[in-house]
Amino acid sequence: MYAPALLATWFSLLLAPVLGAVTWSATPFNPHSVPLAVRTPYVSAWLPQGSGTALNAAWPTFWTGSILGWAGYVKVDGTTYNWLGVPNVAGASKATQKSLTFTSTQSTFVMTAGPIDLTINFLSPVEPSDLVNQSLPFSYYTVSAASNDGGAHSVQIYSDISAEWVTGDNSLTANWTTTTGNVLTHQVQLASQGQYSEINDHIQQGSAYHVTLNTQGATWQSGEDAVVRAQFINNGKLANTADTNFRAVSDRWPVFAFAHDLGSVTGATAPSVFVVGHVRDPAVQYITANNGRQNRSYYFWTKFTSVTAAIDAFVHDFTNAFARANAFDAKVKADALKISSDYADLVALSIRQTLGACELTVGRTSSNGLNTSDVMTFMKEISSDGNTNTVDVIFPSWPLFLYTNPVIGKQLLLPLFAYQATGQYPNKWSVHDMGAHYPQAIGHNDGKDEAMQVEESGNMLIMTLSYVQKSGDLSLIQTYYSLLDQWAQFLIQDSLIPAEQLSTDDFAGTLANQTNLAIKGIVGIKAMSEIASLVGDSAKASNYSAIATSYVSQWQKLAMSSSGQHLTLDYNDNDSWGLAYNLFGDRLLKTNIFPQSVYDLQTTWYSSHLNAFGIPLDTRHTYTKSDWQIWTSALVSSTSLRNQIVSLVRKYAADGLSSQPLGDWYETTNGVAEGFRARPVVGGHLALLVL
């Protein structure tokens, strides 16, 4: 054990700032990758920031790292500056980035272009209380200009996107159209589409949209990247002409551009509003009884009869959407600051990433109308497996849904419940996911999904009860009571001494007698006791409660190291230990079946096992998970240790050693990200907000 003074000095050194090539102010910090337009698994554009990359020093990328062509210029008194992307066209110099600020919904850059400062705001709305708005697969970005020398200056702005937004294979042929009117809309899509088909994680179905208001001085053009960009550089406006030579995405790189003439600028101009997005219909395929198939559509179709109508409403709603976003950001920040400023920073980076893996859908009636009573949300297991509605990916992200709107959480669970209630899934434990390949949720009727028997059964019981507790809605437990009971009975068989199997941390491999997995199973049994009580089944409630209590008593003997100083990773391996993050379920549900002494014991142990960037996941490796560390921070009985754990995760998120969207799996000794990126499990960072 370290002496307190030595420990304090050591910890302050751990949190010393990491110096990168950053020449601008960053609030709250420079993340590995900056979210630009992050709404769905296919509207997911990021700036690979690393140790210091300006908005105009790299191309924006899809979450995978593949380039999304997206370029911006500004012309000031006849001189052209590049503010977005790295287009290679003669006649423009680089604007200079002054600042970067991100919140839960926005990323804002200030760039200096000679005597003008540009403010570029990327707003990906987060509107969980409005399901129509949350389901719209569009994102805003705005550009405003202001003189920085007190003089008046002639200013024109330009932006384009490329056809890279519609495919994961740039050799494929795209076509496009531009519509004019009050709203200018470029629409681009693959000439030959594959329903529900992905290439390199890009959907090969639907259309990308680039939109702006047709205000005075607005012009548009489609065509070869170098030609369209040169048109603006040389003339300060576009030609209002369409290239109709449809071709491969990489054949003279077609782009879809807008320009706005802001006139003579002194004070800050009203923002010029642009929209990017991607729409497909149907959106998700879902399995029904007797191995049937159902095509599901975005929920926004319940309000809008066409994409054009949805776009028109979205672009005209910017002022109100911006106000709602600012209010949401302020509430999240205020709540998170009650923990710490480092915690508020981490939460702000996590919200878009989580919801950006989700799509809200509506089913169809027998006459093919929209069935507004059939609403389901689908989540892509981004980067790790590509599965649909993976139970142990929903579970770590669950705190975000409890915090923002538990109804969306219910909608994530419904596809899993409804499928297994048809009797098509043959195993007695919960299914691992709804389908091997997003956006298909076609089940596993062969029962050969990735087996996480205790993991997923416990997860479903814990999430279900926590939803009921937050919402007061008993419909899930009333409709699917027998299924919940089936999983609880399985947990009674396999939780106290779990057979060799995977936990959610499947990259670490199978293991028998897992202490932390047993915790989950026992909490799941206790959750079923509470569920039974809520539906009036007092006999089962009493029986399951007694079993859970008995298991805790036995578990304490099995799980304790011979030294009595810590829990083991697996029974009888006295030198092993790990993060006992599944105790979070006991705290979340307020079941309190594990004694406080267990929490106190682990607090003391963790306090002496902090590495430079956090606590290892377990003794098999020195890597860790950011979500499980935040869950662990919620369990320790020391506020100081809680804040230390949070600060080390935040330190990793700001270390500049990666340029990919925040990875939840990383090395505690040096802060290097492991194989994951952009996964929705970072919703687990909101764990401290839901206790």
Image (cartoon, rainbow, N blue to C red):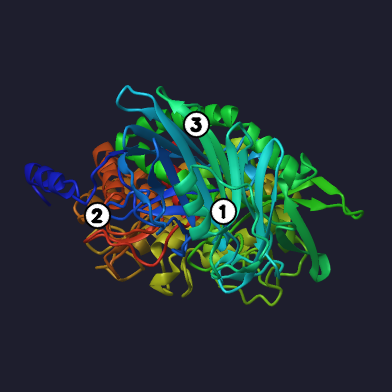
**Against 315, is 658 above or below?**
below
Residue hosting label 3: 262
First-in-chain label (3 vs 1): 1
**Label 2 Cα crowd, 10 Å radius (few <14 / some 14-19 / many 20+):** many
Tag nearer the camera, 3 or 2:
3
Q: Toward the viewer: 469 or 88? A: 88
Residue hosting label 2: 613
**Against 166, is 106 above or below?**
above
Mark drawn on residue 43: 1
The residues tagged by marks 3 and 2 sit, at their Cα atoms, a distance apart of 47 Å
- State the image coordinates of residue 510 (x, y, percent, origin top left): 43, 75
Tag nearer the camera, 1 or 2:
1
Q: Secondary structure at mark 1?
A: loop
The residue positioned 59% from the left and 42% from the top of the image is 219
Residue 266 seen from this side: yes
Check the picture and name the quadrant holding the C terminus: top left
Mark drawn on residue 447: none
Residue type, mark 1 in image:
Val
- State the image coordinates of residue 316 (x, y, percent, origin top left): 65, 32
